[in-house]
Image (cartoon, rainbow, N blue to C red):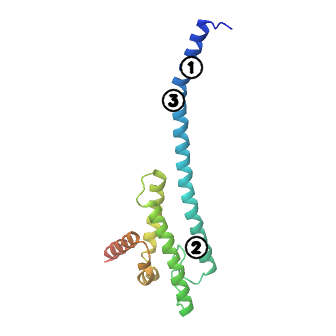
Amino acid sequence: MYKIDHDFVTYLDVVDKLVVILGLPIAFTQYFRTKKKEKRDREYGTYNALDEKYLEFQKLCLDHPYLNIFDIPDKYPKKLDEKQAKEELILLTMLFSIFERAYLLYSDQYSEIKKKQWLGWEDYIRSFCHRENFLTAWEISGNTFDTDFEAYMENLIATIRKEKA
């Protein structure tokens, strides 16, 4: 049998304890970095998914320039025939759906990224709430969404109407 030196065993014991002592903080640090990165990736994934829907809507605005649905309202909106009015209602309802998604994903979040995103979306929603065609479309189809979002919209519209008065 081989005889193991006592000093060598003590050395291995010290190395073992050092690995544990130093390894745990490193492992925890790595774990929390990974979790933070995963959270950031999810937040950007949320942003990208909503951004894609928004860009699809912008393309629809480009395909229907005669409708007053683009971000910048027409100075003199065109009088729409029945088919065009239906198209406008459908497209504004699609916009409501995008707003609903933004509301559900961002409005009550605490991360900095999501708070900043919500402030931008809220300003954007508010800008549409000053438009008659938007308000008319909301009256027609606004009761088909998440009830919290509906309450938010109703409150926002009421607030803007009070500001105008």
Disc 3 target residue:
25
Q: Please name the amino acid that badge 1 sits on.
A: Asp
* Residue 9 drawn above or below residue 126: above
Question: Quadrant of residue 13 in the image?
Answer: top right
Whole-angstrom CA distance, mark 2 to mark 3, is 48 Å
The extreme bottom residue here reads 82
Pick whichever, 83 or 147, lies toward us.
147
> Of the residues under marks 1 and 2, which one precedes in the sequence?
1
> Of the residues under marks 2 and 3, which one precedes in the sequence?
3
Task: Count neighbours of disc 2 (C-alpha within 10 A) and say few if under 14, some if 14 to 19, many if 20 or more.
Answer: some
Does any portion of residue 81 appear in the rendered image?
no
Mark 1 element type: helix
Q: Position of residue 22 (x, y in %)?
A: 53, 24
Does any portion of residue 37 appear in the rendered image?
yes
Q: Residue, x 52% and y 29% (percent of image)?
A: 24
Disc 1 target residue:
16
Mark 2 element type: helix
Disc 2 target residue:
57
Q: Please name the amino acid that badge 3 sits on.
A: Pro
* Quarter of the image with the C terminus in it: bottom left
Q: Please name the amino acid that badge 2 sits on.
A: Phe
Whole-angstrom CA distance, mark 3 to mark 1, is 15 Å
Question: Mark 1 or mark 2, which is nearer to you?
Answer: 1
Q: Position of residue 133 (x, y in %)?
A: 46, 83
